[in-house]
Image (cartoon, grey):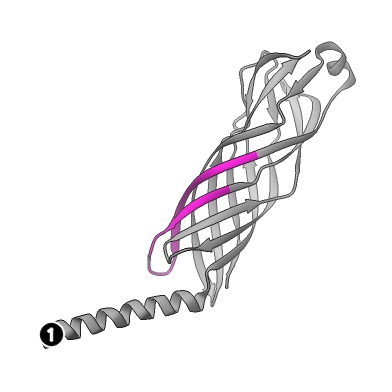
Amino acid sequence: MKKNLLAVAVLCALTSGAAFAQQAEGPWLVRARAVNLDSANKDTTPLGLSVNDKVIPEVDVSYFFTPNIAAELVLTVPQKHTVRSAGTGIGSLKHLPPSLLLQYHFNAPGFKPYVGAGVNYTRFSSVRFDPAVAAALNPSIDKNSFGGALQVGVDIPLSKNLYLNVDVKKVYIKTDVFSSGTKVGTFKVDPVLVGVGLGWRF
């Protein structure tokens, strides 16, 4: 009986200690990353469309519901891309692609790996085409895209509450392409985003 009571007491102490450590560390984690955006450029139109790859800034805010489960909102500023047809520039556009992901963080000594899955909404804006292309094709695109987002990453402690972060995401972004109001195909950006940055837990 005494052994059972002792075991319960130890278990309660460990549980309380873990909860206290979690509370002391804080439920919020804010990261800033430099992210390389590598587009898949899958096009079903006859135009051979593509957009350029680029390095973009990214900020995310995570909230930990438990020591292992968190939600992350990924934000950036509108990004401008050159639109090409068969490798030749024909215009430009901007896109704003916030994502919301649910994450599971693993317990590992010395580092904290995680996986995530969620949804992405992308808003295309400032879509412009060269005058000759506009006159010949009267092109336009669907300015709203909804798709999935997958993620894997790791937080490496540098000091109290400060982490080095490495993060990889696959985001599904697509838009329908029209010529004079008639759909001619679908262009999929579907980028892989590889980011490195710092995180602060509070």
Q: From the top left corner, tell me how far across and down residue 133 is, in percent.
A: 83, 17
Q: Which residue is tagged 1?
A: 3
| Quadrant (top left/top right/bottom left/bottom right) for the N terminus | bottom left
Q: Is residue 143 left or right of residue 21?
A: right
Can you name the residue that lies furthest to the right here?
A: 131
Q: From the top left corner, tell me how far across and down residue 200 is, in percent.
A: 59, 69
Vertically, is 64 above or below 185?
Answer: below
Magenta span covers which residues?
100-121
Which quarter of the picture shows residue 189? top right
Can you name the residue that lies furthest to the bottom here?
A: 2
Q: Badge 1, how many Cα within 10 Å: few under 14, some, many 20+?
A: few
Q: Is residue 149 left or right of residue 41?
A: left
Which quarter of the picture shows residue 137? top right
Secondary structure beneath label 1: helix
Q: Give the residue drawn at x 38%, y 69%.
A: 109
54 and 116: which is toward the camera: 116
45 and 70: which is toward the camera: 70
Decide whether residue 86 is among the magenta residues. Answer: no
Amino acid type of disc 1?
Lys
Decide whether residue 101 is among the magenta residues. Answer: yes
Q: From the top left corner, tell me how far across and down residue 59 is, in percent.
A: 66, 56
